[in-house]
Image (cartoon, grey):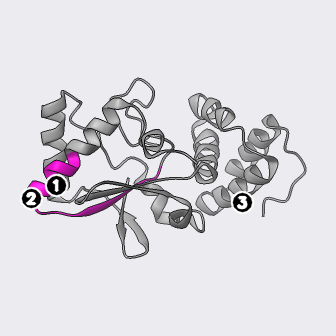
């Protein structure tokens, strides 16, 4: 979860007080876990979101006080590939399969993930992950 | 083109976000949030998403 500040996405960790209070109240009202809304993968912001992320995001005005941007499928492919490689497959691999990414999307995503983790170990796992999706012998930067 | 309800997700997410908007309105706050993960991945509590962040 990030916050929009101008044309930038900034970290929501920790939540601003008014948001934290509102989240707690909604949890009580609807019998949801206290952390039903949480900062989640805010650390992705440290190394940058995919170029054009906010322009692709789907803007939904929930009400005058709250607008939510939901990330586009193209960006989900990026995040899911990164999570799959970073965490060793599992449900992230299933999620990525469900997105049915094209080879072009996977290559774009792969290049982005290497900006977050340029290590050789990560790259090796990334190559294996791409191969699972039939993407081989590509330049991932 | 997806409808807003499809983008927001299931019924509890839509209810929760509507409630959140209402609460923020009471405090006079205005916020723009960005869901960075996949659909509803920042929203814990649903059978699908859990509380795993990314």
Residue indicated by mark 2: B27
Q: Is A124 inside the magenta-drawn segment?
A: no
Residue at point 31%, 45% (across, down): A38
Tell me which chain the residue with mark 2 is part of. Answer: B
Residue indicated by mark 3: A111
Q: Give how far apart the Cα atoms at labels 2 and 1 are.
A: 5 Å
Contact between labelled residues 3 and 2, with CB atoms less than 8 Å apart: no
Query: From this viewpoint, which residue is outermost toward the left?
Result: B26
Task: Look at the numbered disc 3 and give the secondary structure of its residue.
Answer: helix
Quarter-of-image position of residue A24: top left
Residue at point 64%, 52% (across, down): A74
Residue placed most toward the observer, A70 or A118: A70
Residues rendered magenta in the picture: B20-36
Residue indicated by mark 1: B24
Q: Nearer the viewer, mark 3 or mark 1?
A: 1
Query: From this viewpoint, which residue is outermost toward the right?
Result: A137
Tell me which chain the residue with mark 1 is part of. Answer: B
Contact between labelled residues 1 and 2, with CB atoms less than 8 Å apart: yes
Q: Nearer the viewer, mark 2 or mark 3?
A: 2
Task: Look at the numbered disc 1 and give the secondary structure of its residue.
Answer: helix
Quarter-of-image position of residue A128: top right
């Amino acid at each position: 979860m990030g916050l929009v500040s101008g044309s930038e996405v900034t970290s929501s960790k920790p939540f601003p007080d008014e948001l934290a209070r509102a989240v707690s109240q909604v949890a009580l009202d609807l019998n949801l876990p206290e952390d039903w809304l949480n900062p989640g993968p805010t650390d992705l912001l440290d190394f940058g979101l995919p170029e054009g992320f906010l322009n692709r995001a789907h803007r939904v005005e929930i009400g005058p006080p709250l607008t939510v941007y939901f990330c586009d499928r193209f960006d989900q492919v990026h995040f899911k590939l990164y999570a799959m490689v970073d965490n060793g497959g599992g449900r992230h691999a299933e999620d990525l399969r469900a997105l049915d990414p094209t080879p072009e999307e996977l290559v774009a995503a792969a290049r982005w993930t290497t900006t977050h983790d340029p290590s050789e170990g990560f790259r090796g796992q990334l190559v294996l992950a791409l191969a699972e999706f039939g993407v081989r012998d590509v330049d991932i930067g | 083109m997806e409808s807003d309800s499809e983008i927001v997700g299931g019924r509890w997410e839509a209810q929760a976000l509507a409630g959140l908007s209402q609460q923020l309105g009471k405090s006079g706050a205005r916020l723009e949030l960005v869901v960075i993960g996949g659909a509803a991945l920042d929203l814990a509590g649903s059978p699908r998403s859990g509380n795993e962040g990314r």
